[in-house]
Amino acid sequence: MYTGGPLDRAGERRRDAAWIAERLDHPATRIVPVWRDRNLVEPGDAPQAGWLTGAAAAAALEQASSQVFLGLWDEIAYLAVDLSHHEEDGLPSLVNGAEFADLRQVGRLLAADDATILAYARGMLHWHRRQKFCSDCGSPTEARDGGHVQVCTNEACARHHFPRTDPAVIMLVTHVGDDGVDRCLLGWSTRWDTPMYSTLAGFVEPGESLEEAVAREVFEESGIRCSEVTYRGSQPWPFPASLMLGFRAKGLNADITVDPHEIREAKWFSRAELAEFGEFYGETDPTRPRLPRTDSISRRLINDWIEEGD
Ligand SMILES: [Zn+2]
């Protein structure tokens, strides 16, 4: 989820300010509004992404504090606009009855292509709101290249600032016990009150390879040493600015010692035990362990392993 979307980012063309200006004026252009990290959604049982076109798009563009060219889909331009400076009661007239919602709540209900575009818009505008000033000299910055670079307006500095994406590793550690049963290591984070068991994860530190980050995080959080770290795929996670890099690793020991600041409990689970787990959404028994949300790479890593079978 949030990856493999349909947009051509048109990296060459977005540097052309005249071309961007034409896209802004084009009646087919779709505006993707964001308000304080929330995306516009048409509510209902099957919610849909809330694009604006025509007069509503023009009004939103005029009211926006910043805008980002996202890309082209069938030659139609998609532009993210930030309306965060508006008070909530001023929004309905701008958005035709659609609502601003947290993508982490509604993302799994949207068409995958649409969710990918909304995540991208949210991530870019989050960065825009935090890159108004140059971190070298403190002068205001100015957006260029369709909003994909912020340039320091102090000519003596003129530093270019690019969007941030913070790499985080997320890994499923497995271990075959003395009983011959293959199990995976999942942790219940201190951030969750209900027993949601997820793969371990953490940010990559400077001067560290991804494989080293996997081994360090697993050991810090669970006391498990691991080897055979293999890459499984990645997922943008712009909540607010992460790129999740998914791995599989083999545990070398079975005795767990958790870091109590981060992990409430970590355990080895067999496939049979995971089959008894509840779902992230809709589980009514607060004591029943549940699996991670279906739109997460954590869940994909777990599901891939379950499908391999014993
Ligand atoms: Zn500067």
Image (cartoon, rainbow, N blue to C red):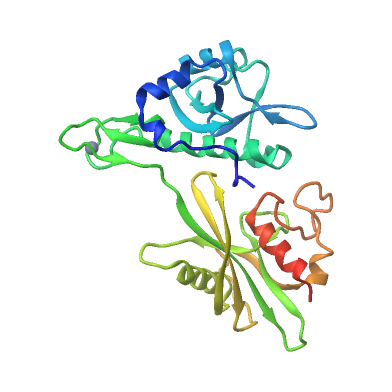
Determine the quadrant in which ligand 1 lies. top left
Relative to residue 155, is residue 202 depicted above or below?
below
Q: Position of residue 248 (x, y in %)?
A: 60, 70
Task: Give the left or right position of residue 123, taking residue 153 as reference.
Answer: right
Q: In the image shown, does 175 or 224 lie closer to the viewer?
A: 175
Residue at image x 64%, y 42%?
A: 104
- 251 vs 128, left or right, is right
Residue 75 coordinates in the image, percent (x, y):
55, 28
223, 125: nearer the viewer: 125
- Farthest residue, direction left: 156
- Towards the viewer: 21 or 141: 21
Query: What residue lies at 20% left-to-right and 32% top-to-bottom?
Result: 154
Residue 136 x, y percent position in the rendering: 24, 42
Label total for image: 0
Q: Quadrant of residue 103?
A: top right
Farthest-out residue, bottom: 178
Please report the residue visible at 63 percent of the width from the left and 36 percent of the height from the top.
102
Q: Position of residue 229 (x, y in %)?
A: 55, 73
Vertical arrangement, residue 55 with respect to residue 78, above or below: above
What's the residue at 74%, 78% (across, down)? 182
Return the residue nearer the eye: 84 or 10: 10
Left or right: residue 135 versus residue 77 is left
Quadrant of the frame with the C terminus: bottom right
